[in-house]
Image (cartoon, coloured by chain):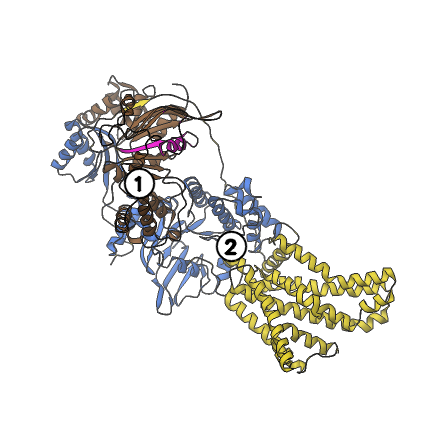
Chain colours: A yellow, B blue, C brown
Amino acid sequence: MLHPESPVTGQTRMDSAWGSQTGDEDVHAKVTQASVDAGQIFEQEYKPWNGTLNPRWMRNWAILRHHLLGIVFKGHRPWGVVTRIVLLLIFLGSLSSAAMVLLSGVVGDSTLASMWGINRENMYGHVLGFFPRNIIFYPIIAAILVGGMISEDRSNGTSALYFSRPISRVDYTSMKFLSIAIILFFVIDGTLAVYYFAEVLVMGRGWSWILDTFPMFLLAAFSGLLLAITYTSIGLALSSLSKGRFFPGIGLLAVIMGTKTLAAIIEALFDKTILYVISPFDCIAHIAQSLMSIESTYQHPWTWSLASIVCINIGALYILTARVSTLEVTRE
Amino acid sequence: MVESLLIETRNLTKSYGPHVALDDLNLNIPHGATGLLGPNGAGKSTFLKTMLGLIQVTSGEGSILGYDIRTEGEEIRSKIGYMPEYDALNPKMDAIYQVQYSGELLGMNPNIALSRAHQALEYVGLGEQRYRTVETFSTGMKQATKLACALVHDPELIIADEPSNGLDAKAREFMLQTLENTVRQGQKSVLMASHLMEDVERVCENIVLLHKGKLAAQGKIEDLKAIDKEVEIHVWGHATKMEEGLLDKGMKVRREGRVMRVRYQDDSTYHTILSTAAKCETQIRKMHDHEASLEDLFLVIMERLGYDVKGSEALLGDLS
Amino acid sequence: MMPDFTQTGRSEDAASTQNNNVPVVVFKNVSKQYGQISALTDISLAISGGVTGILGMNGAGKSTLFKIIMGKIRPSGGQIRLFGEDPWKNQSPYARTGFVPEHEKMHDWMTAIDFVTTFARLNGMTREEARLEAERVLTFVELADVMNKQIGRFSKGMRQRVKIAHALVNDPDLIVLDEPLQGCDPLARTSIMNVIRELGRLGRTVLVSSHILSEIERITEQIVILHKGRLLAIGNLHAIRDLLDQHPHKIAIRCEQPKRLAKDLIDIDEVTSVSIPAKDELVVETKHFGVVHNLLPSIIVKNNHHVWEIDNPDDNLQSILEYLTGGLP
């Protein structure tokens, strides 16, 4: 058994160039003539750095900034052009309710105002209306956002960049989660806020009106938050499962639409709404309906939907953490 | 009394169920440049992960830069720069922002990270290209960028995993020169995992050789190289006569055409060679001590361990 | 290799390709123009047997030379002969030639053995023969253990060896390799160099091009140097060096008492200068390299000098190239 510290003995290989065959042969040659060339210099100087490193929250903030600022500014996470355009379009689309209010104010049409003005149903509709928001806008935005979130780090290998630094997997995941949730929140509730304040400004609503309607606004916003969080959880869980860009988005759409469709079919066939508990959208809609005292479209109690949505979120987050904890840092 | 070691492990063991990835390792790696050698499956990557504090060891202990690998992973990772083997860069980002981000992930202020990024990219020779996106880079440039990411915070130790992988001669030369410079000028320690002996030999003073999770050799390269010394000569004219002449004088000779290697006995060996040449009317165009390479050393170690290895290409090993 | 270009006239008769005296590759005053650009100008050479390195920087004309040999392009002027035949008139020389081009698409999903077998079958072998031949060549390039693995999983060096293997199908007499070591790591380089040297030892004519001097030096001493489309030198590198007698040869000797040795050496007529750059080093300059080296061992031994190292710092390709291209004599 070789003792690691003791020296080694043995023989080494030999090889030599062709042409020096026997060592005794004669050799021949012929020469002509030609011209010149030139070169370059590079000074390599190592520069040390004696700064201090900031604590954990600073690092996490860097991750969040990287993902959020990248939508607009260069030098951060490069979101694709298509993604940015779709994001912009959907954001503008979500502002349609605010636009209608503006229009009604400008035109002075009272029917327009009563149709589109702020009230409990309309705020609910802004967040949880099925068409077009929850069949097109919000699911698609969520799908696009989660697209490469985690899978890109897998395929680019940049997970090594994160985890070889003092970034824990919890930090990594939460910041990614936050960045998507914030954007979704901005699209859903940000536009809701614009809608609300458009009404206030254009219709010249006074403080008493605000006092009356603000609680509803908050409840609608809360539902929007729930929607943002849930879509993010499911989407990120899917992103952590695959290496591709498209699977998470398509998967998310499939989950959202598929569960709803299935439940709708069951309802049509058997006249039972119970299966809607598997559809994340419907659970949240149900909760919002009961919170905002809107007529329920579901037979079962809203507490079941609440329980379901909590389970869905927990399940998604579990998958997410499990997958992220196995992300590779070094090669295997 | 004892100068502090860079890395120290005692009975370090890591098993995944029945499979033992690291088997009772007792390492003493000093500051400076060390090569981590061994075939795929030898435990190199597992070892690096334990050093980075990313996986829990099964038993034993270890410290790196004085920090306990079991409990102080975060500190370790703030003081180490890691250059991974495979792609680790976002292709659509400009090099400068990628390096800046990698600094921010350590907790550097964005503007400080940016200025350090400039310096680091300048240092690795990418000063002119820093505003280009990574996807436009050649392999050599990508490797250099990864190195810049590892150097951005001026770490005490740089862990480079196959740094010259896939590089052409020019890029490889520059990478090795940069690493050497970092060790000598920057006074940094480097732990370089590689299967290219020439590269390790160039940059490192020490090596650690792992095989199947066990430690096969560790120490300074020059101490390990006590291979029988030979004097290499290139002759011209009457080579065969020369060879016979040397053999007659009791010298051990190996020959390949015009090139011969004579076993060094003592200082008189040179005289013996020259007098034989004078007698045979042979020219000795070149004569020098043949220095064994690290590759040779590796082969001998593996032979001693009982493995039939044709070359250190075995380190690229397992294609299953 | 005999660089005797007067043989070209004779080979014009459709001589039997069995003729062992016909050089394998002959160029006579070959030129190639691309519009205004002269890629090759007046190249005359004859190559036969063993390994010849074709050396030159990028743009020197190496790839043009190879394309002409491989029959991809016609020379603008001059003549070329392979095995005595004009390859544009008679394709038969190519049956005895194997090419390993610089860039070649290989099918990553095939295993090495399948790839070579398929190629062999395309060359007219039966399934059995092809398989055996594929095994033979893959063993020759030391890929026997991995011949059943997919090419896509191979390292760059191993892929190069597969390329070389398939060029060796049918045991060609002329093998042409264009930058075979490009992009290979040092280990792959060593094994490919071994293969090339072995082919030379077996008597095949091997042409290897590279722009990396140290690689060529390890492979062969017989070289052809191209520079800006012209032939600068052809032959054994030491002999070429000897011919550059306007640049005196240097001999560096490390010994215990250089001044004492210097006194003994300066008496030799052929020594033009002796200098002592370090306290244990002596550098001799001479225009008669061989003569001085002949005298050196006996002088050292007779006067009891303690010498442990002898070197020729400028007897290498680097120096030759510098002298040839670096300015006026």
The residue positioned 49% from the left and 39% from the top of the image is A44
The residue carrying mark 1 is C193
- Magenta residues span C50-78
Is residue B71 something one can see in this rendering? Answer: yes
Nearest the viewer among B244 and C30 is: C30
* Identity, as a three-letter code, of the amino acid under mark 1: Met
Question: From the image, which quarter does the N terminus of chain C lie in?
Answer: top left
> How many discs appear?
2
Nearest the viewer among B125 and A231 is: A231
The residue positioned 63% from the left and 80% from the top of the image is A269
Question: From the image, which quarter does the C terminus of chain C lie in?
Answer: top left
The residue carrying mark 2 is A156
Nearest the viewer among B130 and C140 is: C140
Tell whether label 2 touches label 1 (CB within 8 Å).
Answer: no
Q: CA distance from mark 1 to mark 2?
A: 36 Å
- In magenta segment, residue C61: yes
Q: Secondary structure at mark 2?
A: helix
> Callout 1: residue from which chain?
C
Is residue C4 positioned above or below B253 on the image? above
